[in-house]
Image (spheres, rainbow, N blue to C red):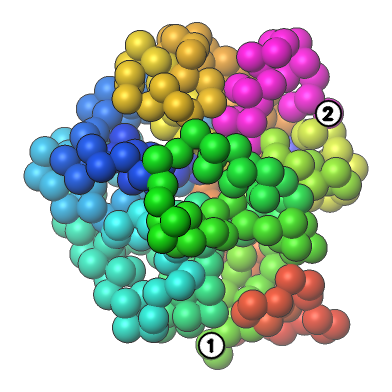
Amino acid sequence: MKPLASLSLDLDNEWSYLKTHGDTAWSELPSYLDVVVPRVLEVLSNRGVTITWFIVGQDAALERNGEALKSISAAGHEIGNHSFRHEPWLHKYPDAEVRDELSRAEEAIETATGFHPVGFRGPGYSLSPAVLETLVERGYRYDCSTLPTIIGPVARAIYFRSSKLDAAQRADRGDLFGHASEALRPLRAYRWDVGPDGLVEIPVTVLPGARVPMHVSYLLALSGRSKRLARSYFRTALQLCKMARVEPSLLLHPLDFLGGDDVGSLAFFPGMDMRGRDKTEMTAAFIEMFADQFEVATVGGHAAAANARTSLPIVEPGARRPRVGARPSSR
């Protein structure tokens, strides 16, 4: 049998990228969902892969997005919560605002898709003890907001250099992509020590050992230098996961399927000098490589398999490293 893995897509919309970048045009909520959703669904259908889509509540609340979002759940994919406003400073919200943010998103997502989310990923990998506690209170089965990489500060600096942010906005986004200490977090599934049963965490997988990204946006950036290099890097990354007994959780983004010919307003984003057709073909090839070597599940399926194990490491909210011992699940 192939080892287990999971695949997900953060359905960040055009306006959410503009907002994080500091472009006031975000307030008009421009959208590319009608373009990207059918494109992604076709790629996944052609390869027989079912994944988890993390949807932003603000998009789900708009009637104009209803058809695109409903087509995702109609195709049998899992739906997750990606917050309502998609603000990467979610971890700075007070407790009451966290509860409101998650509940508003849930309601809008369920209305739009018919699917009640039980999994969460924070925007920009934003997470806090208050978020974890709220997830448990609201009956979530897993979180997948951690990216245990060393390059967060570098990615943040590059992003800020091309942004239109004032000092206050930079402060809000001061933890965007995390800090180098994120690399201390586990690569394998673990359990947050919160609530009566804990909460399963499925980290976004990074290269074992080096702790640098291996998600598809990173691979596409490498392909800008050399397609052969990108394929070789990904092949090596998957082999290292097997050797380290890491069940990889691979992450997709809409811009893995869109180019500058599709969305001119996002020219500042890496890789947008490529055509959408070319990026889609390369992304499809990476998905095929992934599915050839692993049994690809939704993140919910991955979390359920992990939750069945009584030996998951335990991590205190706010901590980076697991503590000794394991907490059995009563679920």
Q: Inspect the image, locate mark 1, and give the three-letter code of the amino acid beneath it.
A: Gly
Q: Mark 2 to mark 1: distance in Å?
A: 38 Å
Q: Is residue 94 left or right of residue 25?
A: right
Residue 275 vertical placement versus 154 (above, below): above
Could you say where residue 161 lies in the image, as x and y percent from the top left? 54, 37
Q: Quadrant of residue 181?
A: bottom right
Residue 318 located left or right of residue 37: right
Residue at 44% x, 44% y is 10
Span colored in magenta: 215-236
Residue at the location (59% across, 46% down)?
Answer: 156
Whole-percent x and y of residue 285? 60, 17
**Residue ranking furthest to the left:** 63
Decide which of 29, 83 is in the foreground and name it.
29
Disc 2 marks which residue?
Answer: 236
Asked which quadrant contains residue 146, the reply is bottom right
Q: Which residue is mark 1?
A: 195
